[in-house]
Image (cartoon, rainbow, N blue to C red):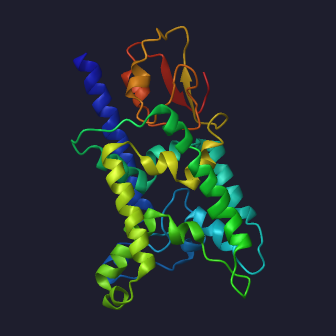
Amino acid sequence: MDKRNEEVKKQSRVRFIIQILAVAVFNGYIIGFVKGKIFKGNSKGVCVPILNCYSCPGAVGACPIGSLQAVLGGNKHKFSFYVLGFIMLFGILFGRFICGFLCPFGLIQDLLYKIPLRKIKILKRLDKLLRYLKYIILIIFVIFMPILITNKFGIAPPYFCKWLCPAGVLEGAYPLITVNESLRANLGFLFNWKLGVLITIVVAAVFTYRPFCKYLCPLGAMYSLFNKFSFYQMNLDSKKCTNCKLCEEKCKMGVEITKNINSTECIRCGECKNICPNGAISSGFIKA
């Protein structure tokens, strides 16, 4: 048992290191944090595969959700096949592995959940209903509102980024207002609203695992659609499985692993694989 526990800890450390490296790669413009300026190099015209605020001073690429809204909300209301194709490519390759290993805001929620306070288990029926929210947000805030609700010039703001995305305040607004006094002087209702959204999610993340990923993230909603047939898969060997349910007890995303291991909610964190006493669970690009 001690050997297995050590292996579980080792795999958790590997995942944590990958998450830290991902943050460093996608937000590697350190000078931006020092000077309080947004990076505007050529790479900013290319999407990254994660939810990562464009306004983050260190961001070296564009957020796919923000980019999708920008194109849909333009005065020509074109559909961004590039952004959609980009999301589909990474979805087909990895599914929600990106959520589990690469997303900076996912890492922040992981760290918040480690705070040693009593955790809250949301009622199963309510939890199931809340999980549909991210799809509703995707359809309404990311797609329909930028197309339908425009100003007199036919242009719409990125509604999800403007009103709901907590990463915008944490990764973008705070680093910028910390350095720029002029920005602090112009803060108003919108900033306070977004700060309220961020605080709500941060507090919730202390008591329940990754609430933003489970219930609100539109990019996670898009990647979830590819989980069942992405190249990267979780596999359960029914011959080795004794139905002990240890994997399901360990899964913080609430996946019924013995019934549907590649559920739309699985973020490929690998904790089920690490805890399985019989080695019945595997993962990789070749389905067993």
Residue 100 x, y percent position in the rendering: 46, 44
Residue 64 x, y percent position in the rendering: 59, 62
Q: Is residue 117 visible?
A: yes
In the image, residue 257 above or below residue 14: above
In the image, residue 192 above or below residue 286: below
Q: Residue at x 72, y 88 (%)?
A: 152
**Closer-to-camera residue (50/208):** 208
- Specify the quadrant of the image occupied by residue 10: top left
Q: Is residue 266 visible?
A: no
- Specify the quadrant of the image occupied by residue 68: bottom right
Residue 257 x, y percent position in the rendering: 51, 24
Residue 156 x, y percent position in the rendering: 66, 77
Q: Is residue 285 left or right of residue 169?
A: right
Number of residue marks: 0
In the image, residue 233 above or below residue 188: above
**Closer-to-camera residue (180/153):** 153
Quarter containing the C terminus: top right
Q: Residue at x 57, y 21 (%)?
A: 259
In the image, residue 62 above or below residue 23: below
Quarter containing the N terminus: top left
Q: Is residue 205 left or right of residue 163?
A: left
**Closer-to-camera residue (225/121):** 121
Q: Residue at x 48, y 69 (%)?
A: 60
Q: Residue at x 49, y 45 (%)?
A: 214
